[in-house]
Image: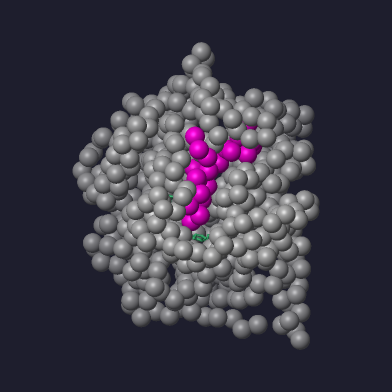
Amino acid sequence: MTVETPDVLVVGAGPAGLAAADAARKVGARVALLDAAEDAGGQYWRHLPAQRPAAHERVLHHGWDRFTALRGQEMLTNAQVWLAERHDDRPPTLHVLVGPADGRDRVRRTFAPKALVLATGAYERTLPFPGWDLPGVFTAGAAQALAKSERIAVGRRVLVAGAGPFLLPVASSLVRTGAEVVGVLEANGWPRLGRGWSRRPAELLATRHKAGELAGYVRDLARHRIPYRAATAVVAAHGAERVSSVTVARLDPQWAPIPGTSRDVSVDAVCVSHGFVPRVELAVSAGCGLDAYGAVVTDHDGRTTVPGVYAAGEVTGIGGADLALAEGVVAGLAAAGATASDAQRRSRSENQRFAARLEAAHGIRPGWVGWLGDDTTVCRCEEVTAGDLRAGAAATGSRGLRSLKLSTRAGLGVCQGRVCGRTVEELLHRHTGGLLDPGRTEQRPLAAFVRLGELAAAEEQEHQ
Amino acid sequence: METHRDPVRPGETSPITIIVDGAPVRGLDGQTVAGVLMGAGRLAWRTTRNGRPRGVFCGIGVCHDCLVAVNGLPDVRACQRRAADGDSISTEEQA
Ligand SMILES: Cc1cc2nc3c(=O)[nH]c(=O)nc-3n(C[C@H](O)[C@H](O)[C@H](O)COP(=O)(O)OP(=O)(O)OC[C@H]3O[C@@H](n4cnc5c(N)ncnc54)[C@H](O)[C@@H]3O)c2cc1C
Ligand code: FES
């Protein structure tokens, strides 16, 4: 098979990857830009497909002009990178399947770039609660994706809940897709939010764009009279075949539900997000070091701990699209052998402070386990409950994450623990009094589900 | 939402029909299989080993809750696969 050898290979065509590829191209590098999705834009600039171009797409987006300027680049979409093959003396070789998602006849391509930029973004973390596996319970991002790229509202009467500023754009796009949003519930109380958001306003001024964007969402809430409640969470969802109501309760500062404060709200959908998890499987396969939050460690030029491998955007820590763009420019330049200007570096570090504040104001607190029941599903794929995890830890007396996962099956299903991995690890950590091998959750040899048949067929073609 | 009231003003698109467990379901060109199913009012289509109904959860290809078989090929994420006119979808052949 021919191995393609661009100067810079960028994985991910979200804000970070688009900015990185563009910056590298502008200083003369030969760049290949890949994304598993059918369209560029990543999670932030999700939009209606080319078959159904919208006249007013920009009403759902911030920075749409920046996107239209970046999206014209040459790129390979529908391109799933499924394996990063590590080498000692050069960046990894990436193996890619190109064609319709999860198809059987995709074309295999291989890239051995001189420099690699990983801009694979993040996915949401949703904490389990009783009934969260009922149809009608969605991640907030699912509501966002269906609104932005399908114009489908996930329900008629929808509650948005969890933690973080991301709940606001979700409520906003739900109302613009015709849903009634009955409320936005933030798990953190006003004292913590106030500390996180109002201290050192100079830092927020540096990210003026983000502040303006937030103000727009707040206006949307006011216009549609959508209540925003702090220190409140969805602690259970009810229904037979689908959600018909949820129980909401007040939380203490550690996110433990306060007894006697719960009430039921009738809804036909609920969208829940408690934060984001960086999508690090390729970075881990490539050997890149991670920080305490499981994000890829980078220096001020976006270099990871592996020579020739750079990272940008939410894979390096959660901080929003502005930060992803700024990091993309810096990493793209460095990967192409150029150096970012002081102003470009400054924009990156100013935005990074926003990320730290986000974590301070909205990071998950341990009291949430108070809303788990023994029969609450934790691992959705293998249907392992919170009680199964506790019993598994007690029965085996093991403190090994690996062996406990094998005995309970938690995190071993088809999503490879992407949805429950961190939660399983945290729960087992408590039940065992401390795991001997924490942090293994992020290790997945394959970055995507692949069919052995598909690989075998590709192999055969090559040898004919 | 009804197109004429949609602030995004989606352009004209051609209707498509896919066959879901033998019955025709209408959707729009450019929608994913999950989009067509949800547009037709279906919230769940897969059944877990313990008999629980599932549909879209993450919407971005991560959770694998939304799996269907497309033209005989199982384990396709409905939220990631663009529907093609005439596709035959089965919700019953999952492992
Ligand atoms: C579901 C979801 C919805 C969001 N919606 C909003 C919003 O409305 N407003 C907001 O302010 N923030 C939103 N965010 C936060 C948002 O992700 C970031 O602010 C921004 O998109 C980060 O940019 P990025 O380039 O780092 O990553 P992303 O935009 O996530 O882009 C990463 C890209 O990498 C691709 N990729 C990943 N792995 C592979 C692989 N193995 N092979 C090939 N391609 C791969 C993905 O397909 C994706 O397109 C959302 C996040 C999520 C998870
Ligand atoms: S809904 Fe999660 S993969 Fe499709």
Q: A67 or A156: which is nearer to us?
A: A156
Most extreme residue toward the front, as rendered? B4
**Residue in view at x 55 percent, y 34 percent:** A268
Residue found at x 40% / y 66%: A18
User: Where does the magenta region start and end?
Assistant: A130-157
- Give the x, y percent position of residue A408: 74, 38
Q: Nearer the viewer, residue A75 or A406?
A: A75
Q: Is residue B77 above or below residue A247?
A: below
Q: Is A291 left or right of A429, judged from the image as shown?
A: left
Q: Residue B45 colored magenta?
A: no
Is A145 magenta? The answer is yes
User: Which image quarter is the C terminus of chain A in?
Assistant: bottom right
Above or below, B22 relative to A35: above
Query: Residue A1 location in percent, x, y?
Result: 65, 82
Q: Is residue A464 above or below residue B7?
A: below
Left or right: where A354 falls relative to A279: left
The residue drawn where x is 32% and y is 45% is: A354
